[in-house]
Amino acid sequence: MKKTVLITGACINTGVAIVEKFLSEGWQVVFTGRNCEKVLEAEKKYREKFPSSDVTGYAIESLIDERTVNEAAVDELFSELDRRGIFIETLVLNAADQGLGIKAFENPLTDFMKVINTNMTWNYCLSEHAAFRMKENGGGNIVFVNSNTAYRAIPDRIAYSASKSGQLGMMRAMALDLGKYNIRVNAVLPGMIKTDRWEKNPEFYKNVPSRFTPIGDVAAGEDVADAVWYFASHAKNTTGAELVVDGGNTIQLYPIIR
Ligand SMILES: NC(=O)c1ccc[n+]([C@@H]2O[C@H](COP(=O)([O-])OP(=O)(O)OC[C@H]3O[C@@H](n4cnc5c(N)ncnc54)[C@H](OP(=O)(O)O)[C@@H]3O)[C@@H](O)[C@H]2O)c1
């Protein structure tokens, strides 16, 4: 029987690469986005590219407002999957609020809360619903798509960095508490990924791989997808682990000046 993965935030960018990796490996894929039209459009593209695949998208809002996670929507999504007899064996928490444009102590507090609530509380809520069913079904695994900004800071991203560092603490604590139910919990930590944002920033594209990464390139979505796939399908004795996919960006202290 096909295994099923639920991947959040998978209408664009890295999420697409993760969906396509699991589809190419023959898994059933359930994915989410917030916008109904975008979800339908992405679903159509996946079905065209993988004609015999089993892929379904759901539109789901993460927050009711900056302070409040939409717990009812998560409950509804999992209840719908239950009704359809779909068991999520792997949960990939890819969606994230990038927390762009939040300057230190210049923005309203709710801007900070929005990022923390999306990247931590909403993911906690999704994990809770998934883990409950994994426990009933003899196990499963959860993969966080985290960031190397959990280790090293970048400018004007306090909320994002805090949320990603907190996410790692949450990941380890979940791994500890859920191990006894045969549920593994791990994190992939990308550095910069070649997304549409990356392409719109040619100055970065020119300088960052050559000067800030020992192997001279940043990740493609497929590199991140491979790391997620490793945790989901191979790393049977690994839980609470962090896999950095950043071309060595994190371990390099100075830019390379030729
Ligand atoms: N791009 C990078 O250079 C980079 C570097 C390190 C780590 N990462 C991490 O890798 C993952 C994927 O990155 P990416 O650049 O591909 O992501 P992205 O394009 O910025 O966003 C992925 C999805 O997250 C969803 N999202 C954004 N805000 C949300 C919210 N408040 N509630 C629910 N969903 C929300 C969006 O879904 P909608 O379709 O609903 O808008 C979007 O499609 C993220 O966890 C990111 O933090 C990325």
Image (spheres, helix red, strand yellow):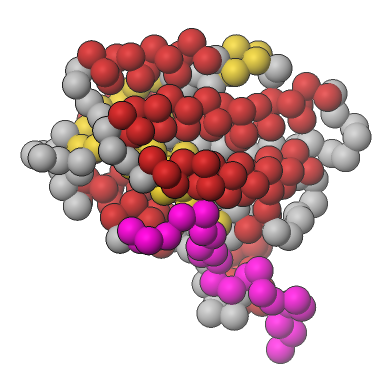
x%, y% of residue 125? 52, 25
Residue 196 visible in the displayed image: no
Vertical position of residue 224 compared to residue 35: above or below: below
Look at the image and say whether residue 204 sits in the magenta stretch: no
219 or 127: nearer the viewer: 127
Residue at figure coordinates x 71%, y 82% from the top left: 256
**Above or below 178: residue 198:** below
Q: Quadrant of residue 68?
A: top right
Q: Residue furthest bottom?
A: 258
Along the viewing direction, whichever of 61 and 91 lies nearer the viewer: 91
Our reading of the magenta stretch's main secondary structure is loop
Q: Position of residue 31 (x, y in %)?
A: 34, 32
Residue 210 seen in the current view: yes
Name the residue rendered at 47%, 32% in the picture. Answer: 127
Rendered location of residue 169, percent (x, y) = 65, 47
Could you tell whether 92 is left or right of 98 in the image? Answer: left
Residue 163 percent coordinates (x, y): 68, 40
Q: Could you tell me how many numbered marks the image carries?
A: 0
In the drawing, does residue 214 fall left or right of residue 139?
right
Q: In terms of image quadrants, where is residue 233? A: bottom left
Bounds of the magenta segment: 235-258
The residue most toward the front is 180
Q: Quadrant of the N terminus?
A: top left
Figure quadrant of the C terminus: bottom right
Whether residue 241 is in magenta: the answer is yes
**196 sits left or right of 103 in the view:** left
